[in-house]
Amino acid sequence: MLCGPEAAKHSDAFSGVGQMAAEVRPASPPLTRRQEARRRRILDATTLLACRGGFDAVQMREVAEEAGVALGTLYRYFPSKVHLLVATMQDQLEHLHTTLRKRPPASDSPAERVAETLLRAFRALQRDPYLADAMVRALTFADRGVRDEVDRVIGRTTAIILDAIGPSIGPQGPTPEQLSAVRVVEHTWHAALITWLSGRATIAQVKSDIETVCRLIDLTV
Amino acid sequence: MLCGPEAAKHSDAFSGVGQMAAEVRPASPPLTRRQEARRRRILDATTLLACRGGFDAVQMREVAEEAGVALGTLYRYFPSKVHLLVATMQDQLEHLHTTLRKRPPASDSPAERVAETLLRAFRALQRDPYLADAMVRALTFADRGVRDEVDRVIGRTTAIILDAIGPSIGPQGPTPEQLSAVRVVEHTWHAALITWLSGRATIAQVKSDIETVCRLIDLTV
DNA sequence: AACAACTCTGAAACTTGTTCTAGATTGTGG
DNA sequence: CCACAATCTAGAACAAGTTTCAGAGTTGTT
């Protein structure tokens, strides 16, 4: 049963015309110091709970309590559990990117450098698999309402990969083919993590898949 | 904050040693005719609701009512919403595989045949984007408790892709490298669908990504 | 200091996935 | 056909994400 006509009246939402318009969001006023501190406490509480039991262990009431904040306030800062976890991922990615800039991958070919980078990130995630579970499940489960936040995470991931590819990219920036290859690497990265987290692939398989997909990089630079 | 030691006492669950042991499940007795019919009504109701509004529109109470079955019964047949949607995906994949066997892809190279196959599937999904949303979100959100069911879906997907690659695969079956490449194609397939469904990629980008990743196939056969 | 506007708190309410229970129905071996 | 075991139904109950709201606290302005 495929309900073709049924869906027709809705499918405009999926027309794909929506492009990536940056949709200037109201640019909320900068946070006060106390607010900055609250936000940080919330993110830290989230990380703590996520480390303990993954996506399911991050319960909004508990996050609020652990952060010393009312439930309503938590929702004012992060409008949903998925927003919260995606923001946490952004936070962690920032760390990672900083670390990577200090000690960049040293391999010879662009593909090897990308693989080295992702394998290093994978090793970091293995240290806190439950945190990885919370972040990655949230990221892939996110719907349209979290688009901007997810876009920021993906943007940072792309930046990390492009950094790893390095100067092999022309002065005009990456070509469409290169961008497609980078997207494929990211797709593989996320989906491989998911299969690992849900116990359907071994660590060895994830490593193998990362190395396999990185071969695409050499094909386009 | 990375909570390394915190997670340590849990991380055995992620040790990756778990391999893919087929874990013979009790093999429940065959269903009676009425039960078969109930199961089908449930799956049809699920498809109907999914077509209307995607993952969120599939509400267990509504599925039960639409299928003319008590809520408890629904849960006896499918122990969670994710189980239900993954089973629905299995159902649809069966259809697709049957169709594909009747009209197999006609391109020349294995990579082109795989791409042709996936693009055809993508076109089918575009006809019911909300159904695609429900199925794919459930599949990637599924946790360890749904492993067997997800494995069956992935297994069918793999079979479809191997069929498309065709006789270029040696008589001993695919090599580990080939299997890794196929996994990467599947990863890309699912993750690209997710980005399309959440409005972060255009149809053109998804197509491009599928074609890009399929180049890996020619590299390994 | 006084005021307005905004933010935060605490608690209840609402939604939807999931579980549980008591009684009705069905299917089956004797 | 009967009795019993499994299944199904209706509905309450529970869990966690989300919303709402009245009142208390903060902040910035004059």
Image (spheres, coloured by chain):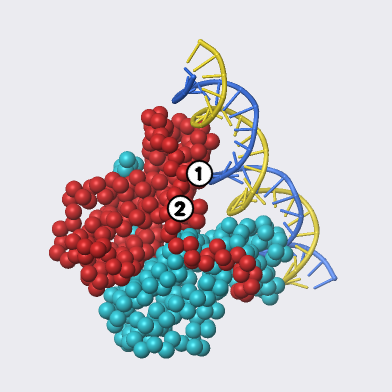
Chain colours: A red, B cyan, C yellow, D blue
* Residue picked out by circle 1: A79
Q: Nearer the viewer, residue C13 or D6?
A: C13
**Residue C19 percent coordinates (x, y):** 60, 50
User: Is residue A94 found left or right of D9 in the rendered image?
Assistant: left
**Residue B160 percent coordinates (x, y):** 44, 79
Q: What residue is shown at x 34% (from left), y 86% (from top)? A: B109
> Hey, what amino acid is under mark 2?
Glu
**Residue D14 percent coordinates (x, y):** 61, 42
Q: Secondary structure at mark 2?
A: loop
Q: Is residue A1 above or below residue A152?
A: below
Other residues around mark 2 within 10 Å, as few (<14) / some (14–19) / many (≥20): few
Q: What residue is shown at x 35% (from left), y 84% (from top)? A: B110
Q: Nearer the viewer, residue D21 or A112?
A: D21
Query: Quarter holding the N terminus of chain B?
Result: top left
Q: Is residue A134 above or below residue A182?
A: above
Other residues around mark 1 within 10 Å, as few (<14) / some (14–19) / many (≥20): some
> Alpha carbon of mark 2 to alpha carbon of mark 1: how far?
18 Å
Q: What residue is shown at x 45% (from left), y 69% (from top)? A: B203
**Residue C2 percent coordinates (x, y):** 55, 13
Query: Quarter holding the C terminus of chain B?
Result: bottom left
User: Is residue A112 found left or right of A52 in the rendered image?
Assistant: left
- Give the mark nearest the N terminus, 2 or 1: 2
* Residue picked out by circle 2: A23
Q: What residue is shown at x 70% (from left), y 64% (from top)? A: B66
- Mark 2 or 1: the one toward you: 2
Q: Secondary structure at mark 1?
A: loop
Q: Is residue A191 above or below residue D20?
A: below
